[in-house]
Image: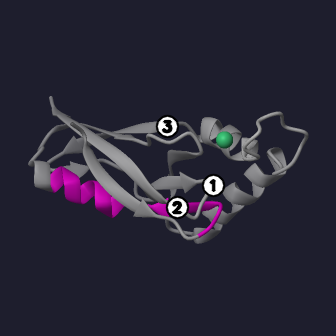
C-alpha cells in the first residue's frame, strides 16, 4: 500500500504546498537515495511542482487556469464540475522527485503543490518511494 498523506482544502480552487508533508514521509520511510512518486487519486485535483517563494505565482496559475477553463462553458458533464476535471488533467495526477541523502531533490525555488479544483474537501495524496 502507498503511504497516504491527508490534505484538507479550504477553497474551491487552491494550491497547497505539501513539500514538507512529503519530505516527512521520505524521512519516516528511511529512503536515502531513490525516487519518490507523489500521486493524487482524485479526478478533480492534481499535483505540480512550481515556485514556492512568491505566493503570487500560485495565484497567477489559478487566475490563468480560470481564464482558460471557465466554470461554466456549456459542458455536458451532469455533475457540473467539468472545469475541475479539465484543470486536473492539465496539471496532471503525479510528480516524481529524486531523493538524495534522505532529502527531496528540488530546485531552490521549487515546492510540490497539491492542486485543488473542486474543494473544499478532505483529500488524499499517495506517496511511494523506491531505493535505487
Ligand atoms: Zn464530475
- CB contact under 8 Å: marks 1 and 2: yes
Q: Which residue corresponds to the image point at 21% horizontal and 54% vertical from the top-left?
A: 25
Q: Is residue 88 magenta?
A: no
Which residue is under mark 3? 93
Which residue is under mark 1? 118
Q: Secondary structure at mark 3?
A: loop
x and y percentages locating residue 132 in the rendered image? 15, 29
Q: Is residue 24 magenta?
A: yes
x and y percentages locating residue 59 in the rendered image? 67, 65
Q: Residues within 10 Å of mark 2 (few under 14, many from 20)?
A: some
**Discs 3/2, front:** 2
Numbered range of the magenta stretch: 11-27
In the image, the residue with mark 3 has its CB under 8 Å from the nearest atom of ligand 1: no
Q: Is residue 119 left or right of residue 39?
A: right
Question: Outermost residue toward the left?
Answer: 30
Q: Secondary structure at mark 1?
A: loop
x and y percentages locating residue 70 in the rendered image? 83, 49
Earlier in the chain: of badge 3 and badge 2, it is: 3
Number of numbered tags placed on the structure image: 3
**Which colour scheme appears in the figure?**
one colour
Amino acid at each position: 500500500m502507498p503511504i497516504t498523506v491527508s490534505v484538507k482544502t479550504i477553497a474551491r480552487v487552491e494550491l497547497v504546498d505539501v513539500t514538507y508533508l512529503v519530505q516527512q514521509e521520505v524521512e519516516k520511510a528511511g529512503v536515502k537515495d531513490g525516487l519518490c512518486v507523489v500521486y493524487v487519486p482524485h479526478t478533480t485535483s492534481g499535483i505540480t511542482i512550481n515556485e514556492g517563494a512568491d505566493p503570487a505565482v500560485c495565484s497567477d496559475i489559478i487566475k490563468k487556469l480560470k481564464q482558460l477553463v471557465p466554470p461554466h462553458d456549456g459542458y455536458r458533464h451532469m455533475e457540473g464540475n467539468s472545469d475541475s476535471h479539465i484543470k486536473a488533467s492539465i496539471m496532471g495526477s503525479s510528480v516524481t522527485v529524486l531523493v538524495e541523502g534522505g532529502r527531496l531533490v528540488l530546485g531552490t525555488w521549487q515546492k510540490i503543490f497539491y492542486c485543488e479544483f473542486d474543494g473544499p474537501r478532505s483529500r488524499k495524496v499517495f506517496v511511494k518511494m523506491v531505493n535505487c
